[in-house]
Image (cartoon, helix red, strand yellow):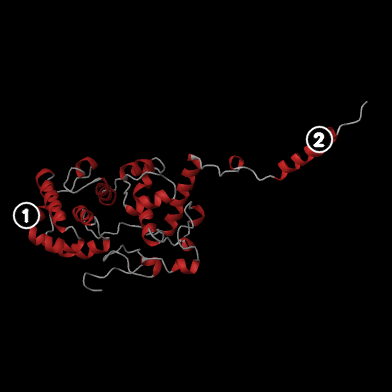
Amino acid sequence: MGKPTQESAKQPAMKATVAAAKATAKPSAKTKPTTKPESRLAMVRRARKINRELAELYPYAHPELDFRNPFELLVATVLSAQTTDLRVNQTTPALFAAYPTPEDMAAAVPEEMEELIRPTGFFRAKTKSLIGLSAALRDNFGGEVPGRLADLVRLPGVGRKTANVVLGNAFGVPGITVDTHFGRLVRRWKWTEQEDPEKIEAEIATIFPKSEWTMLSHRVVFHGRRICHARKPACGACPIAPLCPAYGEGETDPEKARKLLKYEMGGQPGQRLSPPADYPGKPAPALGAG
């Protein structure tokens, strides 16, 4: 046998060097481990657990508009567009004193009603809607608020959101109310990626049994107003933080987060002048009372 050449003698050493380099090399972007996407089943289970946690956190959740009958709730909900429930609640006592029935409101002088509801904003458009829906109730429904979605959404100024509020809270018909708080939170929680309220409503309806829809709406809205704010969520004071994919978007320091809590969670008045008996917070002040 001949002597090994210089090149053949180098080969074992080169192979060892290459093998060592491969063993210590960082994984490429293609081989980096990735987080496994949450399955539909896992998301549904997490969503339902969040709902159970919210039920314990807000056992007193309720509609935050003052009302004594379906007509008052319908009017208050129309007025609540682009303003706070508090401002509506401060405005409606004088409005309902002047126009207690659909027949009274249908016959209102627009300029006089505009002055009464001016604090809620967009008062001219809202006056037109209120007089129009009152006339429709008088002429088509015997002065009574109908208990069907199809009838409600035909009334001037009434969309699905308003209709679901009235159905769920005045008639006991389950409905999902998609307002800005609800839409924000269900996207943060990865229950949906939809932006359109009707599409959000349809997707959330597939996650929860119908019997939960109305109270789910109240709980989510309560949480959005008290803890999971739009600009600075109080993540560090949030009881459902372990279930939230968006944890960390807001303040995570517990002490600083507690200072962000609102309404009864922060020791402040709520939005209703006449809250339910089991509400643990303070009633809101009347208009002009502070």
Instruction: Kindly tell me whether residue 215 is visible in this rendering.
Output: no
Q: Amino acid at mark 2?
A: Gln
- The C terminus - image quarter: bottom left
Callout 1: few (<14), some (14-19), or many (20+) C-alpha neighbours within 10 Å? few
Q: Residue at x 55, y 42 (%)?
A: 36
Q: What percent of the width, then of the height, locates residue 23?
A: 72, 43
Q: Nearer the viewer, mark 1 or mark 2?
A: 2
| Label 1 SS | loop
Tell me, yes or no, whether the two marked residues, 1 and 2, touch with CB atoms within 8 Å: no
Q: Residue furthest front?
A: 6
User: Which residue: 15% across, 65% down?
Assistant: 94
Quadrant in the rendering for residue 56: bottom left
Residue at 92% x, 27% y: name it: 2
- Residue 165 image position (x, y, % from top left): 27, 50
Q: Quadrant of the N terminus?
A: top right
> Extreme bottom residue here?
290
Residue bearing the label numbered 1: 107
- Residue 11, which numbered label? 2
Residue 104 x, y percent position in the rendering: 9, 56
- Residue that protrudes farthest toward the top in the picture: 1
Location of residue 135 in the rendering, given as x and y in whole percent from the top left corner: 10, 49
Give left or right: position of 5 versus 53. Answer: right
Front position in the image: 270 or 209: 270
- What is the CA distance from the residue labelled 1 to the residue labelled 2? 101 Å
Q: Mark 2: which secondary structure?
A: helix
Q: How many residues crowd mark 2 within 10 Å: few (<14), some (14–19), many (20+)?
A: few
Q: Amino acid at mark 1?
A: Ala
Q: Earlier in the sequence, mark 1 or mark 2?
A: 2
Q: How many marks?
A: 2
Residue 86 vs residue 68, the one in the foreground = 86
Residue found 13% across the figure and 47% down from its top? 137
Furthest residue to the right?
1
